[in-house]
Image: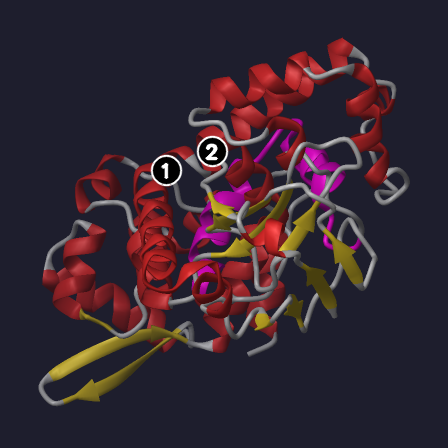
Amino acid sequence: MLRLHFTVEDLGRVRVEVLGPLAETVLGLWNLQRRDARALFGGWRARTGPLVTGDGPHIARFLGSPAGGLVDLFTLVGSAGCLGEGLERLAGAPADRLCEEFAVCAGTDRVRARWLAGLAGADRRSVGRLAQALRDCHRVAVAPYWGSIRHHLDGEVARQGRLMVGGGVAALLDGMRPMAVWKPPVLEVPDYRPLVHPVADYHLGGRPLVLAPSVFCGPVPQLFAGPRADSVVMVYPALRDPVDAAALWAPPADARRAGAPVPPALAALLGRTRAIVLCVIADHPACTTTQLSRRAGISPASASEHAATLRGAGLTRLARERKNALHSLTRLGAVLLDGVGGDGNGADGHCDVDVIGRAASRR
């Protein structure tokens, strides 16, 4: 458990703020390596994992391995409205601050690209390569959804603002249940598993607390408080509803027809259209055949045919609700998507088709 202690003055310094696309990219790379919250992230992970290639898998493990620490770029860079602004601040950060932050993950990854060693010494060439890799990862993992993500996060900030207007900071902190519990003057995070700060009790010491909602953080808030940072940042999960998640990750039908990415190994095995249909069902549990056809950009007859084939293979199931036939993923379908979304990635970040065969053998 984490217990965050407030003074009366501390309560007056609390604010809610969106950190921006760089923070979501770093947290997204961390999320991509996890296997929890499949209802929220299963479809996004399956499509995004094979697209993170080159330096992407290496920086993902370096910046935020689930088994190790998470590099604190949040207090270092602060809130940045666009990716370029965040990367410019990263490139211009003092060498000693960079060394402090990159030391968090020293030794957490046994297989590491050699150039990452330069980050521990704040080598500018290595920092520049990191910035380019983050830009590439943002392009495939976050940028296609950023408009929807930003709208969702702005809505969360507005909701928190209404709580503050109605009941002050106490109402804001009390509204963070069940992930955090306000017991004045302490905010308790019951399931806290520290990635950066292993302390059970933390005192703000006069620094403002920034509550930063994140789509990719979860399921437990995380505290970031560099010893020389001007503020303390608590990143907390702002995406908790599978319906909201489906809306975030769903590209429009015309994007599907134009060639929106699906896992290459999945397309190679099932065929591109059938792979799209499977991804749509993963993103939209309990969708009707009409909804499936519209989101996949195919005719209702074709959607019904592909869904029947996937159902026959045990990857999807059909349920009846009144006159509607509702399609959803089976456990085997989830295992398959998990395999092509991350577990089957080799050192170069590309999917291994054998994962699909191993998934099928578990049926």
Give left or right: position of 231 versus 321.
Answer: right
- Residue type at mark 2 is Pro
Q: Nearer the viewer, residue 294 or 152?
A: 152
Q: Is residue 178 left or right of residue 302?
A: right
* Residue 113 placement (x, y as % from top left): 81, 28
Q: Earlier in the sequence, mark 1 or mark 2?
A: 2
Type of secondary structure dominating the magenta stretch: helix
| Segment tinted magenta in the rendering | 40-67
Residue drawn at 37 percent across, 49 percent down: 157
- Disc 1 is placed on an element classified as helix
Q: Is residue 352 visible?
A: no
Where does the image place residue 213, in percent across and percent down from the top left? 48, 50
Q: Which mark is residue 146?
A: 1
Q: Is residue 245 visible?
A: yes
Comparing 82 with 301, the one in front is 82
Quadrant for the N terminus, please. Answer: bottom right
Residue 56 at x, y percent in the picture = 63, 32
**SS for dot 2:** helix
Instruction: Tell me if mark 1 has few (under 14), some (14-19) or many (20+) residues whose alpha carbon lies within 10 angstroms of its own.
Output: some
Per the image, the residue denoted by label 2 is 21
